[in-house]
Image (spheres, rainbow, N blue to C red):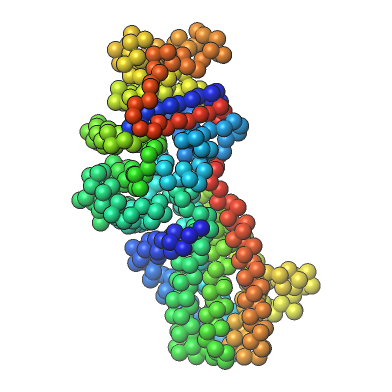
Amino acid sequence: MVIDGLDLTVPKGAIVGLLGPSGSGKTTLMRAVVGVQIIAGGSLTVFGQTAGSASLRHRVGYMTQQASIYDDLSVRQNLRYFARIQGAPLADVDRVIERTDLTGQADRLARTLSGGQANRVSLAAAMLGSPELLVLDEPTVGLDPVLRADLWDIFRGLADDGTTLLVSSHVMDEATRCDRLLLMREGELIADTSPHALLETTGADTAEDAFLAIIESEESRPAHSRTHLLAGGSRQTRRGGRAERTRKSGAR
Amino acid sequence: MTPTRTFATAGRVLLQIRNDPRTIALLLVVPSLLIGLVAWIFDETNVFATIGPAILALFPFIVMFLVTSISTLRERRSGTLERLLSMPLGRGDFILGYALAFGLLAIVQTAIAVGFATWVCGLEIEESLWLLFAVAIADALLGTALGLLASAFARTEFQVVQFMPVLIFPQILLGGIFLPRDQLPEVLEVIGDWLPLSHAIDALNAVSTGAEAVSYIWLRILFIGCWIVGAVIVGSLTLRRRTP
């Protein structure tokens, strides 16, 4: 996977959607941003520092694709442990439990939770210590529409409080809930746009159709002009607060 | 590396075990049952007095090897290790946390096994019990360190269990339980002399017979310590923040 000169300047409190079919490289990109991916070449900086550097580990929260929590601990025991590792105050545990609507399950063992509940525990763990950037890898995968809507409400609430979110999904309809969209396909970034601009430029009715339209126009274009296809319509200015900035010139 | 995070990790590992009563029962009762079985088999002979101490050396080693290799493999597979390494957790915190938790568990396990072996089965310990615990803890930490190492080379639970015959059985065979090491073919004797479990067995024999000086026992513990440090260093190299 190669991403050339992707330079994302995202306003504080924005939700950036990373969309694309399974296997398009979303997880690789997110792991690179968090700093757990071996990068074959190039550099990637977040908040002006090399991704994964020690000082960033307090500022970036990461939720992996599978609910990475301990099955044999209760919800609260899981979160207390992660809070101590993150260096967050223990009072933070109650805050994230409430925020993710897990108060009723707080003392249940994680292995007895439903998939949606386990996902929310994983999200709650990423929220500990209120990181400035949350990287969420397919947080809504496999959930029913109601639970998906609930999660997106939580994301919007976090964004309103000033957290910047990078959320991946392969459900194109979720694109409309983001402030900014990055579309990926086969390891390449094929569009950097906003939901509004996406529909306008392609003239499609749904995000799904728009994505297909982009792929079609991609295939009729020479390979070297691929990235930033729709970038013209999507430049965002910094809105108040510190902006998060990632720069990527190449990742495997 | 910070003490808070190391202790938090040790506490979390112990909490996981506490939430699993069946594992606790197996960890604490099975060694005594097996020691009782061996004592019963050799009821009419004096064999138990000879191999009893060596058997005490085996339990903390084998059990901690299995428990550590499977739990770190689970951490690698469930994504919790990846989460932890994206957080401000040092690799040393992780390893030391596990070592502390399982070291503590080994003390309790050994206390029960030794109590059973001496009071119920009549095994005689000439040297101080503290020395015996020191050897048992070194033994348990050796199992933990090798288990950590093994988990790095296994992708599934099936594979990790297969590492037991690879890393553990040769040490038992060459350790002098079946045949004293000086009666082994020369090459095997040399190999056996360098394996850590052999020294644990020697040390426990010395503790039970009181035939050697205390310094002899500490030298054996030091030798095991070198193996632990080596295995932990190699094991920590396999805990990478960045993975493909």
Residue at point 39%, 46% (across, down)? A68
Asked if residue A192 lies left or right of residue A223, the reply is left
Residue B190: percent from left, percent from top: 76, 71
Going 57% across and 92% down the picture, which residue do you hit? B126
Rendered location of residue B180, percent (x, y): 69, 80
- Quadrant in which the C terminus of chain A is drawn: top right
> In the current view of this chain or complex, which residue is farthest to the left?
A104
> Could you tell whether A1 is left or right of A92 in the image?
right
Q: Farthest residue to the front: give it.
A: A240
- Whole-percent x, y for residue A48 in the image: 49, 35
Q: Residue at x 40, y 51 (%)?
A: A86
What is the quadrant of the N terminus of chain A in the image?
top right
Relative height, residue A48 to residue B188 (above, below)? above
| Residue B70 shows up from this direction | no
**Relative to A140, is B142 above or below?**
below
Please state which of residues B173 and B63 is positioned toward the viewer in this rendering. B63
